[in-house]
């Protein structure tokens, strides 16, 4: 489906996955730097199966519509350049459009780049109830942001990109925010990645769904 950014009015594409049974809420699901891949769509479908109406925005439509690149050196370089070109204001405007398009309660989750976007959205966007951020490499550089909703963070202990120094920086700035470490590498949640870790993915998913359930029932505080 097509949505218009709340920042600049740009029209972007978002993958929509609707629950087939009882609806638990809305969920904005944010991609990695590789685009709106089939793996991202599969994740959206899996959360829809859990009862969430999911919108997964194509975050780099301003740079290249339909962007979906392999996880090779060229894809990483292109994805990073698109992330930098898009900037945080455009990203937040797109996320806000997704939030506004969903009936509440609305949650957000994201992976790598999407984990950082989810962190920022918890701080800057309105209408969210909770955020679950997976291996957001930019979060340590954005610890000055203050989330307005309950947040949990997930990192892999074997992640060479996000080190213990970064976890410690986040923990020192936000000691009240749960930061979970798993015996896994960077992209442990996604089944289409070589570094997928089923046990870590299962546990972090359970924690994510518990957070969303508690937030929708008012049992957790920001």
Image: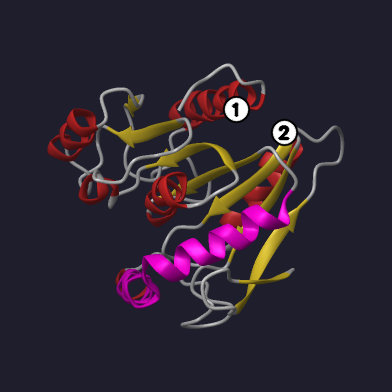
Question: In the drawing, what numbered circle is on residue 34?
Answer: none
Residue bearing mark 1:
209
User: Pointer 2 and pointer 1: residues touching (CB < 8 Å)?
Assistant: yes
Q: Residue at x 39, y 56 (%)?
A: 113
Instruction: Estimate how packed mark 2 is, as few (under 14), some (14 to 19) or many (20 or more) residues with alpha carbons within 10 Å.
Output: some
Residue 198 sits above or below residue 40 on the image:
above
Question: In the drawing, what numbered circle is on residue 50?
Answer: 2
Magenta region's main secondary structure?
Answer: helix
* Left or right of 84 in this view: 19: right
Q: Residue 5, located in which quarter of the rendered image?
A: bottom right
Q: Quadrant of the N terminus?
A: bottom right
Q: Quadrant of the C terminus?
A: top left
Camera-nearest residue between 18 and 186: 18
Q: Residue at x 35, y 68 (%)?
A: 72
Q: Most extreme residue toward the left, as rendered? A: 165
The verdict on residue 204 being magenta is no
Where residue 14 sits in the image (x, y, percent)?
A: 66, 65
Residue 22 sits above or below residue 123 on the image:
above
Camera-nearest residue between 28 and 41: 28
Q: Residue at x 37, y 51 (%)?
A: 116
Q: Most extreme residue toward the top, as rendered? A: 219
Q: Residue 164, located in which quarter of the rendered image?
A: top left
Helix, strand or loop at label 2? It is: loop
* Left or right of 57 in this view: 140: left
Where residue 170 sits in the image (x, y, percent)?
A: 23, 36
């Amino acid at each position: 489906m097509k949505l218009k950014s709340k920042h600049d009015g740009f029209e972007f594409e978002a993958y929509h996955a609707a629950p087939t049974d009882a609806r638990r809420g809305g969920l904005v699901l944010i991609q990695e730097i590789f685009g709106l891949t089939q793996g991202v769509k599969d994740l959206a479908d899996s959360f829809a199966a859990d009862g969430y109406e999911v919108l997964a925005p194509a975050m780099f439509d301003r740079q290249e519509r339909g962007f979906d690149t392999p996880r090779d050196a060229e894809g990483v370089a292109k994805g990073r350049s698109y992330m930098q070109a898009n900037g945080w204001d455009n990203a937040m405007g797109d996320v806000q459009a997704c939030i506004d398009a969903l009936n509440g309660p609305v949650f957000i989750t994201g992976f790598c780049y999407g984990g950082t976007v989810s962190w920022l959205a918890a701080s800057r966007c309105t209408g969210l109830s909770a955020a679950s951020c997976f291996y957001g490499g930019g979060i340590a550089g954005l610890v000055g942001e203050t989330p307005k909703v309950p947040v949990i963070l997930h990192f892999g202990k074997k992640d060479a990109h996000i080190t213990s120094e970064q976890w410690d920086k986040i923990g020192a700035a936000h000691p009240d925010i749960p930061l979970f470490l798993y015996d896994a590498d960077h992209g442990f949640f996604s089944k289409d990645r070589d570094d997928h870790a089923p046990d870590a993915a299962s546990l972090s998913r359970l924690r994510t769904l518990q957070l969303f359930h508690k937030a929708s029932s008012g049992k957790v505080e920001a």
